[in-house]
Amino acid sequence: MGFKRILIANRGEIALRILRACREMDIEATIIHGREDRGSLPVQLSDAAIPIYRKEPLSSYLEIDAVINAAKELEVDAVHPGYGFLAENSWFVSRLEQEGITFIGPNSEVISLLGDKIRARAAMKEAGLPVAAGSNEPINNAEEASILAEKIGYPVIIKAAAGGGGIGMQVVNQKSDFESALKLCQSRAQSAFGDNRVFVEKFIEGAQHVEFQVLADGKNAIHFGERFCSIQRRHQKLIEEGPWLNEAERKRIGDLVCKGAEAVGYKGLATFEFLRDKHGEFYFLEVNPRVQVEHTVTEMISGHNLVELGIRIAQGESLPISQDEIEIKGHAIQCRINAERSANFIPSPGRLWDCHFPSGYGIRVDTHAHVGYDMPRCFDSLLAKIIVWGSTREEAIRRMRSALSETRLEGVETLIPLHLRILDEIDFNSRNITIHYIDEHQELLGD
C-alpha cells in the first residue's frame, strides 16, 4: 500500500523537488522549516508545515527529536531526508524505525556500514569492486602509517573513517610528513565527526571523478549509467555531466556496483563514487546512500524519475524496471548556480531583486529562488541548478552557454561567469579534465 503523507526533512531546491514528486504521486507533502525558510517556496506549497525555530539555524534541520516529533504530529507514513542534514545519520534512521515511520532510503545498519569508510572499503572489496591499496584498520601512529606507505608506495592520502566532503584529508609524499599530517587529520575528523579514526590509502594522481547511479530494492539492483564530476572546488562539485564512459566500461563497472549494492542488502537510491586514474583504472571511493544533487543529469539522459522511484521502493515495491529497459540517450550537463563570488568562492548572500531563469527545448531548472527571495547566509550557497540536454556533448555545451547567458539574478553574485569561462576553455571542450581542473586553471576564476 502506498504512502498517504510524507514529511520532507530538508529545505531549498531539493525540498521542492521532493514535494513535486509527491504531488505527482498523489501523496501529501509536509515539511519542517527553520525561521529563515518560513516564507520559502517549499513551505508555501506544502500541504502542512511545522516550524522548528532554533537560535542556531542549522539546528532546525539537525535536531532529531524535533524532526521525529513533527513526523508524529503530522502522522506521516514516511520521511524523505533529501541530501545533507540527517540524510546519512544512522541514529536518526534507527529512531524512525523504532517509531514505525519509514525512512526513504536504506536501513540504519546499511547507513552505518557505508558511513564507516573502512568498513565500506572492506565490504565493496569483498563484493568484487576495485579498491585502492590501503589500510584495513584505523591507523594510530605515524610509524605504522609510514610502514604501510613504503609498502604501497608514495604518495598516499590520510582520510577520516567517518568523513565526507574531503574534510581533513591529507596527502603525504614522504615519511617525514606523516607525524603532522596524521595529527591534523585526526584532529579535524574528531572536530567534524566526533570520531578521530583515520586510514591510509594510495593517492590516485591525475584522477577523474566518476560516479554510478544505482537503484536497489533490498535484493536486486540496477544502474542508470555514470556521471562525470571532476570539476570541483574544495571537494564540492561545480559541474556534472554524463555519460562519460564507453559502453564496455559502463557495463563492467555497472555490473560491479549492482553487485556491491546487492551484497549489503541496499534499498533505495545510491551513488557509487570512483576515482579513475590516468591509465583508465577505477578505484572505489565511497557510497552516498541518498539522492544526489546531480541526480538531474541521470534523469535527463535516462528518462526516469529517480526521486519517484526512490519513494516507490520505500513503499515496498520491487524494482519496476529491468537493466535492459534502461537506455542512455544524448548528453546532459548541470551547472550549480551557487551564490558565490567566482574569484574566490566566498558566499554572496542577499535579496534577489530580479530573477529570470532560462527555458526552452532541452533545458531544465531546479530552484527555490524567486524575485524577492532572501538568500540566507547560514546555509549552503546553492541557489539553483541549470541542466541541459543535447544529442551530443557539443550540442549540450552550446545549449548550456545559451541558457547561462539568458539567466538574470540581480542582488547576489553567482558562479555564472565562471561557468561560462569553463564552457569556452580548451581542456574542458577536449575532455582533458581531472579533479585538479580548477587548481590548474586559476586564470578562469577572474574577478
Image (cartoon, rainbow, N blue to C red):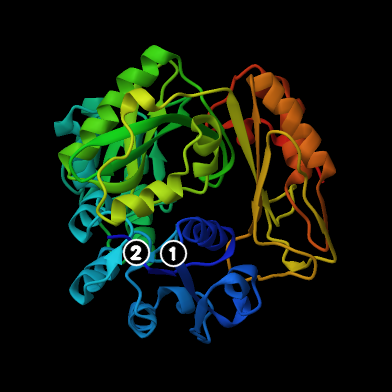
Residue 248 to residue 95: above or below: above
Pointer 2 residue:
3
Tell me where residue 91 sits by quadrant.
bottom left
* Image position, residue 32 (x, y; %): 48, 76
Task: Note whether 99 is above or below 411 in the view shown.
Answer: below
Residue plotted at (39% across, 60% down): 188
**Residue contact at pointers 1 and 2, CB within 8 angstroms:** yes
Which residue is more in the foreground, 443 or 273? Answer: 273
| Secondary structure at numbered mark 1 | loop
Give the mark nearest the N terminus, 1 or 2.
2
How far from the left and from the top, in percent, is residue 443?
Answer: 75, 34
Q: Amino acid at mark 2?
A: Phe
Q: Quadrant of the N terminus?
A: bottom left
Residue 300 location (% of width, % of height) = 56, 35
- Say few, some or many: other residues with alpha carbon within 10 Å of mark 1 (under 14 / 14 to 19 / 20 or more): some
Question: Which residue lies at the image location 48% right of the left edge and 67% below the top edge?
Answer: 10
Report if residue 143 is visible in the image: no
Q: Is residue 156 left or right of residue 138?
A: right
Give the number of the disc on residue 27: 1
**Does residue 259 appear in the picture of this structure?**
yes
Circle 2 crowding by C-alpha within 10 Å: few under 14, some 14–19, many from 20 = some
Q: Tell me which residue sits at (46%, 27%) in the image.
A: 207
Q: Amino acid at mark 1?
A: Ile
Q: Classify 402 as above or below 68.
A: above
Of 214 and 239, nearer the camera is 214
Pick the front one: 8 or 124: 8
